Image (cartoon, rainbow, N blue to C red):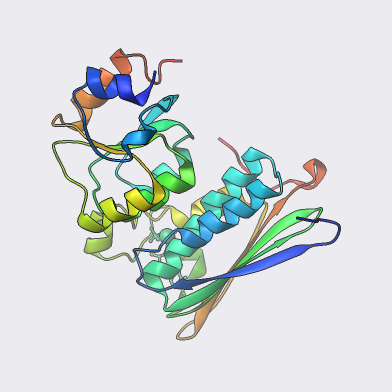
Amino acid sequence: MRMDKSYSQSFEITGNNFFDAGKAATEVKMILKQIGINSDIIRRVAIASYEAEMNVVMYAKRASMTIEISQEKIKIVVDDEGPGIQNIELAMKEGYSTATTEMREMGFGAGMGLPNIKRNADHLKIESEVGKGTKVEFVIELKESARGGSKER
Amino acid sequence: MKLKELKEKLNLSVRCAEDKLIQEITGGYVSDLLSDVIANAQKGDVWVTMQVHVNIVAVAVLKEVAAIVLVQGREPNEDTLKKAKEENIPILVSKLPAFQLVGKLYESGIGKT
Ligand SMILES: Nc1ncnc2c1ncn2[C@@H]1O[C@H](COP(=O)(O)OP(=O)(O)O)[C@@H](O)[C@H]1O
Ligand SMILES: [Mg+2]
């Protein structure tokens, strides 16, 4: 894969399709492995992508996940059609979840998804319109000096 | 330690991906919360869980864990097994509850370093 400029690819995510859930995040990870991105960066992108993908599977109808890779950064945009988020600040709180009992029994709904994205990304932007959908956009910097937001354990 | 040795030592039953038992195990993680596993499990871990539904396979693939170990004799769902075969992720089953199994894993040196 040539990387002189930038590379971009999109994946579809279908709401409520638990069988294929995680596929988009796995594809994203494969791409990053192929181009030889460092493993700590891949780990962070994979965690954030998985959480964003699962939110579509659990709460929305459908979405596209687009990855854009340049020399400087990796940007992921998950743009969904769905119920939207009423109160983004509340949704960002660790432990806050509207997951159903059934989802919780499956080990989802810990309310750690959005906080996990924030923790692993350098920048996170969430836009949402109730009744229409949600757009989650995050960036992971590839240049050491540009990194700020990451709070690694 | 190799997965195969662990299987014999702890009396685990293999449900799929038998050919992957030659893998080396480098650590372990126990959790039933998928966000926790996604954030904290490491490549090469054995992942001990009660969850038996299909999404555990996607998590295992993404984290590149060495194997999923189900506790208390729980069996993988049909579609979990189907997906695990497709992805070639080993699923093993233990009769022990999580606490005892993890104790034994630790005793055999997993996760001590
Ligand atoms: N794409 C989305 N569409 C609608 N609601 C969402 C979306 N993503 C997150 N939410 C809301 O934000 C809450 C918190 O999300 P998150 O931190 O991922 O935790 P969890 O998924 O465990 O509930 C969810 O319970 C849900 O109410
Ligand atoms: Mg979530």
Q: Nearer the viewer, residue B74 or A59?
A: B74
Q: Residue at x 39, y 72 (%)?
A: A59
Residue at the far right in the pictured view: A4
Q: Residue at x 58, y 51 (%)?
A: A29
Residue A5: x %, y % from top left: 84, 61
Residue B103: x %, y % from top left: 25, 20
Image quarter for residue B36? Answer: top left
In the image, residue B17 above or below residue A46: above
In the picture provided, is B112 more to the left or to the right than A127? Answer: left
Q: Nearer the viewer, residue A22 or B3?
A: B3
Q: Nearer the viewer, residue A135 or A53?
A: A53
Q: Residue at x 48, y 48 (%)?
A: B62
In the image, residue B79 above or below residue B41: below
Q: How many marks?
A: 0
Residue A46: x %, y % from top left: 55, 50
Image quarter for residue B104? Answer: top left
Q: Is residue A122 visible?
A: yes
Residue at the far front in the pictured view: B19
In the image, residue A128 above or below residue A69: below
Q: Quadrant of the N terminus of chain B?
A: top left
Q: Is residue B35 visible?
A: no
